[in-house]
Image (spheres, grey):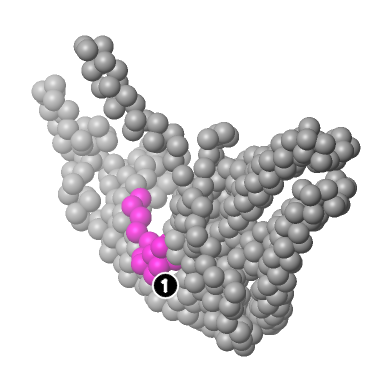
Amino acid sequence: MKYRSFYLLLLVLLLPLSATGQQTWSLEECIRYAWENNLTIKQQELGVAQTENTLFQSKMAFGPSVSARISENVNWGQSVDLSTLTILNHVRSSNTGMGIYADMDLFTGLQRLNTVKQEKSKLSIAIQEVQKLRNEISIEITRSYLNVLLAGEILDAARQSRESVAEQCERTRKLVDAGSQPLSALLEVESQLATEDLQVVEAQNNLRTYNLVLQQLLDLPTDANFQIVKPQIGDLHEMDPVSVDELFYASRELPQIKKTEYTLEQRQHELAIAQGGRYPRLSLSLGYASFYSDANRKKDEEPTEDTGSGSIDDLLGGSSAGFWDQLKNNNNPSIGLSLTIPIFNKWQVSTNVKNASLGVEMAELEMKNAQQLLMKEVQQAANDATSTYLRVQATERNVKAMEESFRYVQQKFDIGMLNGTDYIVSKTNLFKAESNYLQAKYEHVFKLKILDFYKGIPITL
């Protein structure tokens, strides 16, 4: 009893681990996982972060540039005493200068303002690139997910077909033993049973392959226990008519179209920046500086007893005025305005303007080309959805007809009115019809999800 309780407790503890290992993935979970872990998306997101930094720096360009400067110069031979502006001959002297300076552009032809707008457009382009990549990955995952579902249903159909043939083989064996059927009939049915086994193996291989493809899209380690959720496919007997114009209007918000719009904006701002090179530039500068010089030494001052504690004047050689007094007396605040008027710059500005204008025209053509391409894609998507819908209806009718035909053939085969060849042909045709229907069904589901994508509806099952 003690050991039984121990094993029950161990089983309870291991159940959560087992459940974790057998996690089933829905389509939404697969897409969300890919968005969060795909390395290419992460690279694109890092590019967005870099563009954000560039945008921030373009905004900071409106502020002043502030710097501090400290200099120490030692002169000998002929030099100038900065404190008295007298010429010194063959006298060693040192000068210490320090100051703080600020520069700021007051007007640059609106180039900096347009640079900020340009960087905003670049950021929007980078964001649309990420979203475009996410959409492409979502479509590929949806296609792969539906392939797994299709392979699973074909495997189920192959197993059911194999069980049916196995049952028929057993009935035929009894009929042969009873003398109602020739031995050749049993041999033919057994041959079909071997074919059914091969179909099951091929269906298993296809399912394993599609599972592997889906795991690779998710960048998951290969797991033989990888399972996906099998959702209920809705009614495929009815389909609302598709308006190409409405679908195209709804799809204009897709990232591949928004990207071209932002690219046009970026090119227009680039043109404005180039045109700003024709305007004068007005700059403001502020400064505060001072200096210390030891050239004007005391001549009449008697030497004093060294107390052992040096001062900054002792370190700098001593002078007629103390270090801090000189810095206070030699202060030099300044303010200035600078106006730069461009006259001739070797046609550089004109060339930049012409190239930027061509860039705007290229962006306009790119946007029109993207819209034309989108219209073709929408037209193709609408046509594909209609075609797969009609194919689903036709293959479903074909399956029903083949089921009735096979039922009739099986009844006649059981009473010896048909040979095994006719039975095998009918059974093969039925399995082929079922496979065609399943392929048409999932292809139609995929085309419907493409329509949802162009409508801006999230892809779900």
Q: Mark 1, residues whose alpha carbon is within 10 Å: few (<14), some, or many (≥20)? A: some
Q: In which quarter of the image is the N terminus?
A: top left
Q: How many numbered marks, from 0 up?
A: 1
Q: In which quarter of the image is residue 209?
A: top right
Q: Where residue 47 sits: x, y (%)?
A: 52, 55
Q: At 58% across and 57% down in the image, what residue appears?
A: 142
Q: In this view, does 266 lie above or below 212?
A: below
Q: Where residue 83 sits: x, y (%)?
A: 29, 52
In magenta, the rendered stretch is 56-69
Taking the magenta stretch, the answer to whether it contains residue 306 is: no
Q: Where residue 97 sits: x, y (%)?
A: 32, 49
Element under disc 1: strand
Q: Where residue 89 sits: x, y (%)?
A: 42, 43
Q: Quickly name the residue at label 1.
A: 105
Inspect the image, locate mark 1, and give the three-letter code of the amino acid beneath it: Asp
Of residue 317 and residue 263, the one placed in the foreground of this image is 263
Taking the magenta stretch, the answer to whether it contains residue 67 is: yes
The answer to whether residue 366 shows anywhere in this view is no
The answer to whether residue 235 shows anywhere in this view is yes
Q: At 51% across and 52% down in the image, what residue appears?
A: 230
